[in-house]
Amino acid sequence: MGDTLKKTDILPHLKTAWLGRNYHYFPEIGSTNSELRRRYVTEALPAGTLFVTDFQAAGKGRLARKWVVPANSSLLLSLLLNPKWPAEKGQWLTMIGCLAVINAVKSVTGLTVKIKWPNDLMLDVENEWRKFAGILVEGEMADGMLETAVYGMGVNVNISKSQLPEAKTAPTSLMIASGQKVDRVALLISFLTHFEAQYEKAMQGESPHEAWRQELITLGQPVEVAQLHNRTVLRGTAVDIDSYGRLKVQDDLGEIHLIYAGDVSLRGHFDN
Ligand code: BT5
């Protein structure tokens, strides 16, 4: 389709009813998440508003980490959503995004994507799972409900090996995994189509967790969980998730611990 993400190049191809229809392209920005969060406070932005950029000077990961990619190489975007779900369902947005990426990457490149709990999207390159995309959901709560949420995502698309950023989990890109340049516009259009469909199912009450669980590479693996709230490290095996996406870790004594995505970093087999 092409390689420019400007509004006039995207809107004619968009297949969604509402997601991404209020489309804002920035050649350069600090962080699409921060900017969208700043602006929805003062402007009447509709649900489905999309901020997308070709370069972030201050891209954010979780837990104050950084997200770094070369200019014009990738998909860096944020979506405004008003799910009004109970707070526990926050991880559903990450699940929906993961499933949409899996479907979009499959249809555009044929590649198989897997998920590293809780928010990393992985490709098998030279027999090693490597991270090519990450999700950061930020939200505003009101009375225990997720009133407004910003779904942020970075997908490494056309980054060569020499341009990959420093990262603890080995990074990669769709171009490296597929051996050819990947059409960012086709990927964005397909992602939005799948996200909207999955989101609408979730709004009807259909949980995405079963489909998400199927794609996790974390289950059955030894894990070390650095729990930030009490500064302890839990060692054990990741055995399952629950419907809210919390990880069930069995320790050496056989006890099951429920781990929330928000305050952990996962180590061990998959360094994070
Ligand atoms: C994430 O955090 O994976 C969420 C990344 C979300 C980025 C998007 S871009 C659009 C929107 N606007 C923003 O400002 N953010 C969102 P986390 O799981 O904390 O992973 C961050 C870690 O990944 C870093 O500490 C690095 O080790 C590594 N990393 C940084 N850039 C990377 C890249 N391009 N590819 C792979 N790994 C990377």
Image (cartoon, helix red, strand yellow):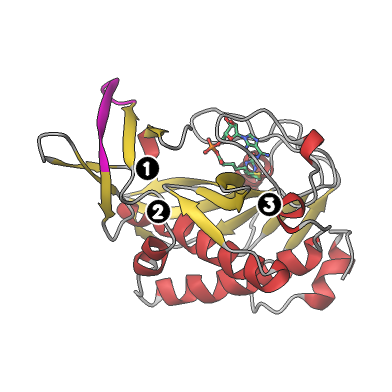
Magenta highlight on residue 159: no
Q: Secondary structure at mark 1?
A: helix
Q: Is residue 86 above or below residue 57?
A: below
Residue sitting at x 59%, y 62%: 101
Choose between 91 and 155: the one closer to the eye.
155
Q: Are marks 2 and 1 in contact (CB under 8 Å)?
A: yes
Q: Amino acid at mark 3?
A: Leu
* Circle on res. 261: 1
Q: Is mark 3 within 8 Å of ligand 1?
A: yes
Choose between 45 and 173: the one closer to the eye.
173
Between the C-alphas of marks 1 and 3, the distance is: 21 Å
Q: Is residue 202 above or below residue 42?
A: below
Residue 145 appears left or right of 97 = left
Magenta highlight on residue 232: yes
Quadrant of the rendered image containing residue 86: bottom left
Q: Which residue is mark 2?
A: 91
Q: Amino acid at mark 1?
A: Ala
The earlier-in-sequence mark between 3 and 2 is 3
Residue 221 appears left or right of 187 = left
Residue sitting at x 54%, y 76%: 197
Q: Which residue is mark 3?
A: 77
Between the C-alphas of marks 3 and 2, the distance is: 18 Å
Q: Bin the neighbour count of mark 1 within 10 Å (Cα to Cα): few under 14, some 14-19, many 20 and up.
A: some
Q: Residue 4 in the image: state x and y as whole percent.
A: 89, 59
Q: Which residues are magenta?
A: 228-237
Q: Is residue 203 above or below residue 70?
A: below
